[in-house]
Image (cartoon, helix red, strand yellow):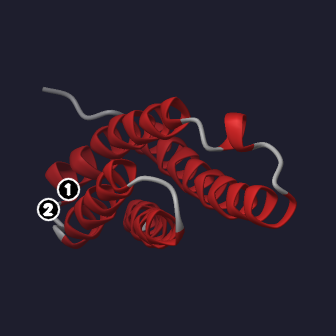
């Protein structure tokens, strides 16, 4: 079995960090626009967006964090990323509101941290 080249893993980890950031921005913007201005609820709070985002996070996370843990043997990114994905999944089933926002932002921060650790491990 051959490993995916480190450069590809690094790109996927960077994509994971970007997606995590976009998710956090979406969450904060959604709360702000809907809560403060009362607009955009139909689009920004659509449950399909959250399910698709979670599916993307799981795919990118499994492809990069999981494979990197197998390759370099460091379990910390896998543990942090798994906690983050679990928090994000909990947010999806929680429903809209401040609890969802807190779970999502904490989850994406964990996933982004795991990706950053992988990027740094790949540079070593």
- The relative height of residue 50 versus residue 17 in the rendered view (above or below) is above
Q: Nearer the viewer, residue 19 or 8?
A: 19
27 left or right of 82?
A: right
Determine which quarter of the picture holds residue 110: bottom left
What residue sits 25% from the left and 34% below the top? 3
How far from the left and from the top, in percent, is residue 113? 44, 71
Helix, strand or loop status at disc 1: helix
- The relative height of residue 58 versus residue 26 in the rendered view (above or below) is above
What residue would you read off at disc 1?
A: 69
What residue sits 38% from the left and 62% below the top? 118
Marks 2,1: beta carbons within 8 A: yes
Helix, strand or loop status at disc 2: loop
Measure how far apart labels 2 and 1 are at the Cα level.
5 Å
What residue would you read off at disc 2?
A: 73
Residue farthest along the right direction in this orientation: 37
Determine which quarter of the picture holds residue 114: bottom left
Q: Nearer the viewer, residue 77 or 39?
A: 39
Q: Is residue 59 visible?
A: yes
What residue sits 41% from the left and 41% below the top? 54
Indicate the quadrant containing the C terminus: top left, top right, bottom left or bottom right.
bottom left
């Amino acid at each position: 079995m051959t490993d995916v080249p480190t450069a590809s893993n690094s790109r996927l980890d960077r994509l994971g960090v970007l997606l995590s950031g976009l998710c956090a921005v979406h969450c904060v913007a959604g709360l702000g626009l809907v809560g403060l201005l009362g607009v955009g609820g139909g689009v920004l709070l659509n449950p399909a967006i959250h399910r698709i985002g979670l599916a993307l996070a799981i795919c990118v996370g499994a492809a990069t964090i999981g494979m990197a843990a197998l390759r370099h043997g460091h379990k910390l990114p896998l543990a942090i990323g798994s906690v983050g994905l679990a928090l994000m999944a909990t947010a999806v089933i929680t429903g809209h509101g401040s609890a969802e926002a807190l779970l999502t932002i904490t989850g994406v921060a964990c996933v982004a941290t795991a990706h950053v650790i992988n990027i740094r491990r790949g540079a070593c």
